[in-house]
Image (cartoon, helix red, strand yellow):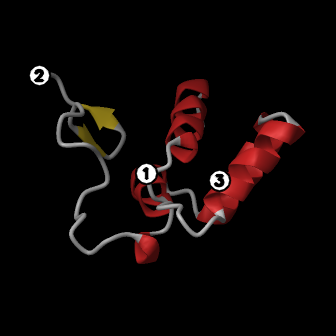
């Protein structure tokens, strides 16, 4: 895994609205892999805050906690991403 891919996974994991399933779809990393990466990469206090937020009842990091009305992984205004390849406009 390249440094750019690692940075993107961390960025996606940090975003509250990006579910783990989107990370798995794009990078093939399960939730457990992402948690392990975050644990190794972040400071302990940052990791603890992130984990607390992810496990909270208001988190949308898991598809089963999301509204059925949300059918996409990303904002409609975001640049198109297809299997980790950013499309040109």
Q: How many residues crowd mark 3 within 10 Å: few (<14), some (14–19), many (20+)?
A: some
Q: Position of residue 82 (x, y in %)?
A: 26, 44
Determine the secondary structure under disc 3. Answer: helix
Residue displayed at 50% across by 42% down: 15
Residue that mark 2 sits on: 89
Question: In this orientation, which residue lies closer to the viewer: 29 or 54?
Answer: 54
Q: CA distance from mark 3 to mark 2?
A: 30 Å
Residue drawn at x 81%, y 49% is: 48
Q: How many marks?
A: 3
Q: Which residue is mark 1?
A: 18
Depth check, front residue: 71 or 41? 71
Mark 1 crowdedness (10 Å alpha carbons): few <14, some 14-19, many ≥20: many
Q: Foreground mark, 3 or 1?
A: 1
Disc 2 crowd rating (10 Å Cα; few below 14, some 14-19, many 20+) is: few
Q: CA distance from mark 2 to mark 1?
A: 22 Å
Sequence-wise first label, 3 or 2: 3
Residue at 42%, 51% (x, y): give it: 17
Q: Which residue is mark 3?
A: 34
Which residue in the rendered view is the most extreme toward the front?
Answer: 58
| CA distance for labels 3 and 1 | 13 Å
Q: Quadrant of the N terminus?
A: top right
Question: In what element is the residue under mark 1?
Answer: loop
Q: Which image quadrant: the C terminus?
A: top left
Q: Secondary structure at mark 2?
A: loop
Q: Which mark is residue 26?
A: none
Q: What x and y, as percent, mark residue 10?
A: 60, 38
Instruction: Please give left or right for residue 5 compared with residue 86 in the image.
Output: right
């Amino acid at each position: 895994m390249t440094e750019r891919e690692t940075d993107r996974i961390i960025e996606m994991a940090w975003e509250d609205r990006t579910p783990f399933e989107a990370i798995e779809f794009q990078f093939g990393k399960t939730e457990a892999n992402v948690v392990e990466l975050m644990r190794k990469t972040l400071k302990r206090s940052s990791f603890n805050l992130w984990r607390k937020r992810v496990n909270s009842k208001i988190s949308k990091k898991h598809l089963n906690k999301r509204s059925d009305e949300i059918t996409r992984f990303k904002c409609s205004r975001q640049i198109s991403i297809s299997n980790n390849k950013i499309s040109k406009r």
